[in-house]
Amino acid sequence: MKNIFKRNYSRIPEDLRMSIIERSCKQVSRGVFFSTIIIITSFLPVFLLTGQEGKLFGPLAYTKTFIMIVDAILVITLAPVLISFFMRGRFKPNNANPVNRFLERIYEPLIRACLNWRKTTIGINLIALLISIPLLMSLGREFMPPLDEGSILFMPVTLPDVSNAEVKRILQVQDKIIKSVPEVENVLGKAGRANTATDNSPISMIESIIMLKPKTEWRKGMTKQGIISELNSKLQIPGVTNGWTQPIINRINMLSTGIRTDVGVKVYGQNLDSINQIEQTIRKELEGIEGVKDLYAEPITGAKYIDIDIRRDEIGRYGLSVDDVNAVVETALGGMQLTTTIEGRQRFSVNARFGQDFRNSLGALKTLQVQTMKFGPIPLDAVADIRITEGPPMINSENALLRGTVLFNVRERDLGSTVREVQQKVDKNLPQLPKGYFLEWSGQYENLIRSERTLKLILPVVLLIIFCSMYFAFGSAREALLSLISIPFALIGGAYMVYFWGVNLSVAVAVGFIALFGLAVETGIVMVIYLNDAMQQLVELKGNSRETITRADLKEYVIAGATKRLRPKLMTVSVSIFALIPILWSSGVGSEVMKPIILPMIGGVLTSATHILLVTPLIFLLTKEYELRKFGKLQVMDTKH
């Protein structure tokens, strides 16, 4: 559209007006089409994400893709028609616009300085790029930025042999302490499993959902992390291991990885005692590591069992069989089904067993009466040894192997560096595992590794597709490479923005950089199109030969190509920035995920725009001088197709 204002006239004939509109639309059609392909291609890694990251960012990628496809179709079909309808009457030249004059007055001295100080300009950009690399490397890593759900899930674990009465008392004490914190609105806790077949929680596991008041009612300076720290210090009860998470992410973790904390070390093997020994060794190694919180090794032993070992020589002396003794034990402890009652469409079994006073201690069990044919009733301990033994409270298996788990959350540190330190310490200090035993790292770290592997595999393919798209757009590998150079310089601003904002690298940040790739390349294509248009004008005026074209001519026409089309380039950048900046000040639910996405986009758009406006013309000028010096003529892309 800006090409329509190219000529200085007041009124033009209708056929000339339509001809100018047609040529202008054709000039940018190829760039618009391949820019759309590049933006869609840049989102290919997002399409290939799996798991919860794929479900979260997939709709974003599909929505933007469909919008870009429709946008490309409208720009090629509808936009020229609308231009022909509304671009009528008297027109003013570019320099009649005060905004355009102001921008050119600032930009032209800058571009001339960059073209004069070539080594300095390129050197500053390279230094900024080199500085951004260690900044990125120093950032922490996490799977996803934590989403503030507005509530807290408190998941303490007690000893495996805790009684119902004791766990009920602990639950009441904990709820009372939690409710004493001013920021807590309500608290509701449960011990053991819920009324569902999919919940296998033991009685030693407590879950308390803590609903918080609105942030306007919190104490001054208080944060959610501060509330958790205060609650954790108040809830230090002997024999209880605290755990802190959020309700939704806890369910997602348990469904996707089987781990209820951020990270879990799964120990696979063939023997429970050996697994327990490895678990305890790992737990001791993890103690004291910065960032490791709520450390807990799932108990393999500790549950209490009543063993009734029947003495066969004794039951033979009394004329009893094993089934006779087992029937007494079953009736006394487990209960025997007497009948079934029917209430409407429901059926209930009616069981009978001994009263609580006859089975609530070892002494009472030993005195249970076993009826004999010849000797009358005898106590159970006359024919059986009765004792309390320890055993596993729950036997977990996965992939046909016994499994134990060491669980911990990560707070006050990033997930990636914490797990890396933990792995190094475990690998260094853990003895050689027996044959058939191995470790597996699970939880959020498992998701992090999976997403990083996907991105590393697909990103080179994406860059290759982007390069091929630009090659078809320009018809020159050199021009395509010139536009592709803008991508690493776009990373500069993104890296600085993410670093100084204190955000860890995550899938959300990666999605932001992916979106930045398309924006940077799109702006670069627009600049290269206008620079080639300036070269065409130079060739038409002076011919395509080094005898007629001087270095001064090249410089002036590069400045003209960069300067006279300044406003549409700045409009492209400004629209992106002004659309994204309001998200930085958002504070609602979900803003924690959105900010890491737009931070690299805002910083990257600023640096890529600076690079494209100041450095791309310089590189373009150097390229054309090289062509003129080596080939004796310029290789000019046809911008009118």
Image (tube, helix red, strand yellow):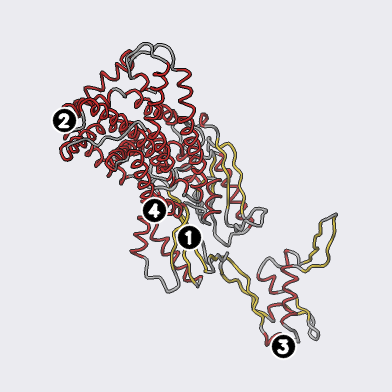
Q: Callout 4: 10 Å neighbours few (<14), some, many (20+)?
A: few
* Total numbered labels placed on residues in the image: 4
Q: Nearer the viewer, mark 1 or mark 2?
A: 2
Residue 123: tell me if it is visible: no
| Residue found 75% across the figure and 67% down from its top | 335
The C terminus: image quadrant: top left
Residue 513 image offset from top left, x and y in percent: 38, 40
In the rendered structure, find residue 11 and report the number of the disc placed on it.
none
Residue 46 image offset from top left, x and y in percent: 45, 45
- Disc 1 marks which amino acid? Ala
| Spatial separation of the CA atoms under disc 1 and disc 2 | 63 Å
Residue 54: tell me if it is visible: yes
Q: Along the polypeptide, which appears first: circle 1 or circle 2?
A: 2
> Residues at badges 1 and 4 in contact (C-beta under 8 Å)?
no
In the rendered structure, find residue 457 and report the number of the disc placed on it.
4
Q: Along the polypeptide, which appears first: circle 2 or circle 3?
A: 2
| Spatial separation of the CA atoms under disc 1 and disc 4 | 35 Å
Q: What kind of element bears circle 2?
A: loop
Rendered image quadrant of residue 419: bottom left
Front one among 89 and 586 = 89
- Disc 4 marks which amino acid? Leu
Q: Nearer the viewer, mark 2 or mark 3?
A: 2
> Residues at badges 4 and 2 in contact (C-beta under 8 Å)?
no
Q: Along the polypeptide, which appears first: circle 3 or circle 4?
A: 3
Mark 2, residue position: 117
> Residues at badges 1 and 3 in contact (C-beta under 8 Å)?
no
Q: Along the polypeptide, which appears first: circle 4 or circle 2?
A: 2
- Disc 2 marks which amino acid? Trp
Residue 385 vertical placement versus 574 (above, below):
below
Mark 1, residue position: 297
- Disc 3 marks which amino acid? Gly
| Spatial separation of the CA atoms under disc 1 and disc 3 | 46 Å
